[in-house]
Image (tube, helix red, strand yellow):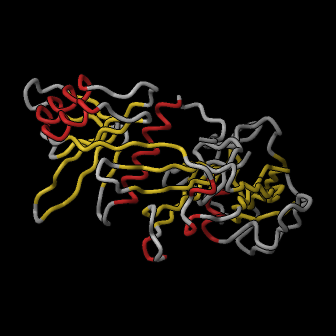
Amino acid sequence: MPTKQNDSPMWRQFEELVARIEADAGPLGLTVKSPDRIRCKITGRLREVDASIRAGIGTATVLMTIECRKRRPQQDVTWIEQLATKKTNIGAVHTIAVSSSGFSDEAKAVAAHHGVDLRHLSEVSAAEINRLLRIDFVLFNHKRCSVARVGFRVFRSLNWTMPDPKQVDFVLPPTADLHAPIFTHVETGRTWSINDLWLQLQEATDPFSHIKRGARPDVRTAVFPYPGNVTVEAVGGPKLLGDVMLSVVLSIDVEQITLGEARRVEYTSPNGKAIQRVEFASRQSQPEEWRISLQAPKNATDISELKTGSNWPNSRLLE
């Protein structure tokens, strides 16, 4: 299963993938959490499960749990018996046991007796993937932003005019912490940082508008005017602000992930039903994995059975 570099161990990535499959396979309104801690009805202690599913039925909420094992030997009856006891003790309606290597015949029989649902998660080739999921490649657009300069003009008057970005009273040192709360509203005491200004700008407009993908970086400047009610920490003490001129270097890098590089898995149950999933994940380091997913029953032919999803931040932090 190709993946980007990830600090999480493989078994944890396995659990997270199963949770995503179950979340997309179910109806709207499911709450899937991985991992989760559920209180034991006998001991009162919290017990960890690899994932939980909560669904509303009428005025009640039912609990289902997911337990995973990414190990080579087939899972035997011992693990299933442990899960059956745990299921009862924490009050779960169902428990789904997921293995990367399958289950022994005895394990299948005991699971059926105790109401433990079995699933097998395995890798599949690009040729085996349902045509509804067979996208040749996905392009990730990575927005890059870094500070070129932060200039400050002290407050002069309320007759504001657009300042010249080159004419500033002082600048932010290059080594300054962009997340430090250097601004203070003199009336409310609220504080914020340079990075907060950048996030505010992204809420108001798209700073990357007209930036060409794969082209050379472009420098743009945004002006934040203040009517004499904000101070900034500076050499010699706080100064009353008139304008902040934030100049940033912007670029958009393009990354292609092909179907051959994507995660391709099949999620099967003993009754023969199977779900296939393809995840195109960026290989570039991010705080969270960037991905685009497609999921459908293995033999689906109608596009209405296709589930799609994605995970990436709406805003970029300054680098």
Residue found at the far left of this picture: 42
The x and y percentages for residue 138 are 69, 61
Classify residue 297 by image quadrant.
Answer: bottom left
Residue 247 in sight: no
Which residue is at 31% across, 30% downward? 104
The x and y percentages for residue 309 are 51, 62
- Which quadrant of the rendered structure holds the N terminus? top right
Relative vertical location of residue 275 with respect to residue 88 in this rendering, above or below: below
- Which quadrant of the rendered structure holds the C terminus? top right
Which residue is at 79% across, 58% downward? 254
Residue 155 in sight: yes
Which residue is at 56% across, 48% downward? 124
Q: How many marks?
A: 0
Relative vertical location of residue 128 with respect to residue 94 in this rendering, above or below: below
Relative vertical location of residue 7 with respect to residue 274 in this rendering, above or below: above
Quick check: 254 left or right of 263?
A: right
Residue found at the far front of this picture: 105
